[in-house]
């Protein structure tokens, strides 16, 4: 890590008081995943990396790059995750397996088939990764079609409705791969996601237990968001308000087999008004 970036890194222990609104990458190995989420919810800490997880160096670099050039995450999501030292169009294209646009609810299976085929052909598709990818893609697709257009109004849409969005307001699923890491990114063109509310739902599942939250059956309980986060090794959210939201899940085989649900994930967040 270049010396010029060291001011953007904070080595955090659980007995320290976080700096509210700190525009730094917090490095830790002492807090669980619920406390990681609370760093953002209570103190607006945008990046937390766990130095005991695989790909720590890359995730640290990704966090620094997002602090310095947040718009690059929206332009080059795969390179931001997999090649943070070289975030540019060429590297992004080289590591991107496919980009799949969609705007209709009935396109889900076709989008799923294309994405899983790309992951499998890349060599990044052991059975466990394919199973987790399928669950994550299902939730991300559902979020674009049924949640993003209605987030601001609070309207809850029946998941059996055959929603058709305007083509220019549809979603885009992006699959990337490098060195046994699979990237699943999904973009909507509404930019309506309330990041604090979204993460609070996930934190509630960790605090109260996902089963209890499911049994309560409350709308907007966040089970889908929890599922994506819990299955991921690292997790990215970017929001340009009123313009687009980009959620990214990163999977790798070894971590997928061994990571405990309470272990802190790498997490990277950015939210800002669009230009």
Image (cartoon, rainbow, N blue to C red):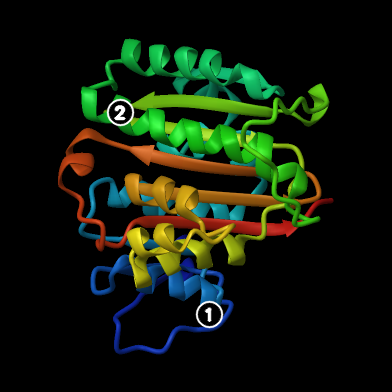
The residue closer to the viewer here, 90 or 51, is 51
Element type where label 2 sits in the image: helix
Q: Secondary structure at mark 1?
A: helix
In the drawing, does residue 30 fall left or right of residue 159?
left
Residue 3, quarter of picture:
bottom left
Query: Horizontal and vertical percent for residue 250?
Result: 38, 40
First in sequence: mark 1 vs mark 2: 1
Which mark identifies residue 43? 1
Q: Nearer the viewer, residue 213 or 25?
A: 213
Image point (31%, 50%), residue name: 57
Residue at x 75% of width, y 52% of height = 155
Residue 27: % across, % down = 34, 67
- Front tag of 1 and 2: 2
* Numbered mark located on residue 148 in the image: none
Identify the residue under disc 2. Answer: 131
Closest to the observer, 113 or 219: 219
Label 1 packing within 10 angstroms: few (<14), some (14-19), many (20+)? some
**48 in relation to 174, above or below:** below
Q: Is residue 4 above or below residue 145?
A: below
Q: Residue at x 33, y 57 (%)?
A: 265
């Amino acid at each position: 890590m270049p010396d010029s970036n060291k001011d953007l890194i904070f080595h955090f222990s659980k007995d320290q008081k976080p700096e509210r609104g700190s525009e730094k990458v917090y490095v830790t190995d002492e807090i669980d995943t619920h406390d990681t989420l609370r760093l953002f919810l209570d103190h607006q800490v945008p990046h937390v990396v766990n130095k005991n997880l695989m790909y720590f160096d890359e995730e640290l670099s990704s966090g620094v790059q997002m602090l310095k050039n947040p718009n690059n995450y929206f332009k080059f999501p795969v390179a931001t995750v997999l090649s943070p030292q070289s975030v540019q169009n060429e590297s992004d294209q080289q590591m991107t397996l496919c980009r799949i646009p969609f705007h209709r609810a009935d396109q889900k299976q076709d989008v799923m088939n294309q994405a899983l085929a790309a992951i499998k052909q890349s060599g990044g598709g052991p059975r466990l990764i394919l199973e987790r990818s399928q669950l994550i893609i299902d939730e991300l697709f559902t979020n674009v079609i049924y949640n993003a257009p209605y987030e601001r109004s609070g309207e809850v849409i029946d998941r059996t409705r055959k929603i058709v969005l305007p083509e220019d307001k549809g979603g885009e699923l992006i699959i990337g791969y490098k060195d046994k890491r699979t990237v699943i990114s999904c973009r909507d063109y509404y930019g309506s996601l309330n990041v604090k509310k979204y993460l609070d739902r996930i934190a509630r599942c960790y605090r109260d237990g996902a089963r209890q939250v499911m049994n309560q059956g409350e709308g907007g309980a966040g089970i889908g968001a929890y599922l994506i986060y819990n299955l991921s090794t690292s997790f990215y959210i970017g929001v340009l308000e009123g313009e687009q939201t980009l959620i990214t899940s990163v999977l790798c085989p070894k971590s997928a087999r061994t990571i405990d649900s309470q272990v802190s994930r790498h997490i990277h967040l950015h939210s800002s008004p669009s230009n």
